[in-house]
Image (cartoon, rainbow, N blue to C red):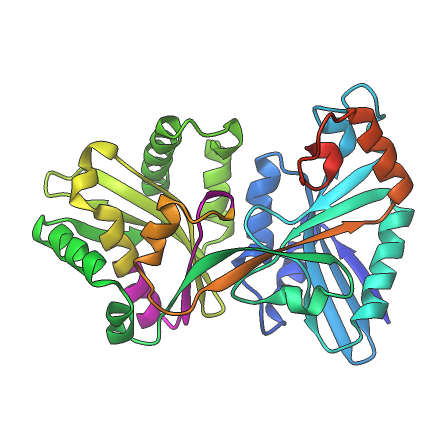
Amino acid sequence: MMFSVYTLDNSEQWDSIVRSFADYDTYWLSGYVKAFKIHGDGEPLLFYIQRNDTRAFTVVMKRDLADCEYFKGNIPNGEWFDFATPYGYGGWIVEGSATEEIFQEYSEWCYKNNIVSEFVRFHPVVKNHLACMNGYDVVQLGEVITMELDSAEKIWENITSKNRNVIRKAMKNDVKIYNGRYPEIYEKFREIYNGTMDKDNADEYYYFGKEFYDSILNDLPENAQVFYAQIPDGTVIAASIMFAANGRMNYHLSGSLREYSSLAATNLLLYKAALWGSANGCKTLYLGGGVGSGEDSLFKFKRAFYKGELKRFHIGKKIFNQEKYDELTAMREFSEESGFFPKYRA
């Protein structure tokens, strides 16, 4: 039996464990979570448990409840915590069938270490929610789009005819797509992305600092790069950060200059990124869904890249200390139900 908890001080062991599993993706790597630690999302931890013929791991962000805006001054620092998956996706990856014992042991550790609850966003392509049904309250949310990258022909076939015309138009307008990883292109991405967030009136959380991008650049050298669209005068009019690991490519953050929206640069960028992925051994390009799992304009834009069957997004909820959970919820004095989990953070 083995039960180990790793911090970023053990990043080599951390990544060695992650990469030893058949179903891992970039979201579980130490370099990925390091950027979100810098962003202020909590302390990253990797749990690795082995029992007989079953082994499993998960990555969480440990958050001090004393830092939560609702409890500042009411809870002492370093006493009560909760867990959430890092931004993006995560949850347990399990190889074997003895999940009940593993989740039991994990729950006992969490209770003893004053972890009140955990919120998980499962990976829709890996479908790791299936192994967690007996450990979490698993809830199915909206549909999400994943492009199949079997071949260039298959990619083109699966794009709607209307979207193909838009992509052809971008090519005719001499929009060129490039990709790479170097400091200047990450800085250019930040500028474009922040401008997009400004226009969308985005929450402050979605503005990432220079140190965050430096970390993505330097701590994920084999997994992260920027794809960007340029017009003949040299202006970069759209850019996206893409991740690739273990045959899985992920569309992560994206931005574009609104004044050039008629050139459809992002349409061409995603098509070219899919071709790059296919040529470099990736089987899928995960695009995601709409805002808040809704079938909005963002969902429709992504849907135009893949006519095939959609995947479902699942979340997981777990309360380790019901008494403390109820106490924290009571401190909030809610007037109505929101469905948010954990309720005390709503």
Q: Residue furthest front?
A: 336
Query: In which quadrant will I find the C terminus?
Result: top right
What is the x, y in percent for residue 321?
87, 45
- The quarter in which the N terminus is drawn is bottom right
Q: Position of residue 284 (x, y in %)?
A: 41, 67
Tell me which residue sits at (73%, 78%) in the image: 96
249 left or right of 153 in image: right
What is the residue that sits farthest to the bottom in this orientation?
A: 53
Residue 236, x across and y down, in percent? 22, 40
Q: Is residue 305 above or below residue 38?
A: below
Residue 21: which quarter of the image?
bottom right
Does 186 appear above or below 252?
Answer: above
The answer to whether residue 111 of the structure is visible from this angle is yes
Placement of 145 over or under 117, stated as above or below: below
**Residue 251 vs residue 271: left or right?**
right
Left or right for 274, reference 13: left
Give the quadrant of residue 138.
bottom right
Picture coordinates of residue 179 (x, y %)? 29, 53
The residue sitting at the left extreme is: 172
Q: Residue at x 58, y 70 (%)?
A: 23
Residue 56 in the figure: left or right of residue 328: left
Is 303 contained in the magenta span? no
Question: Which region shows up in magenta?
Answer: 272-292
Q: Quadrant of residue 306?
A: bottom left
Check residue 273 for magenta coloring: yes
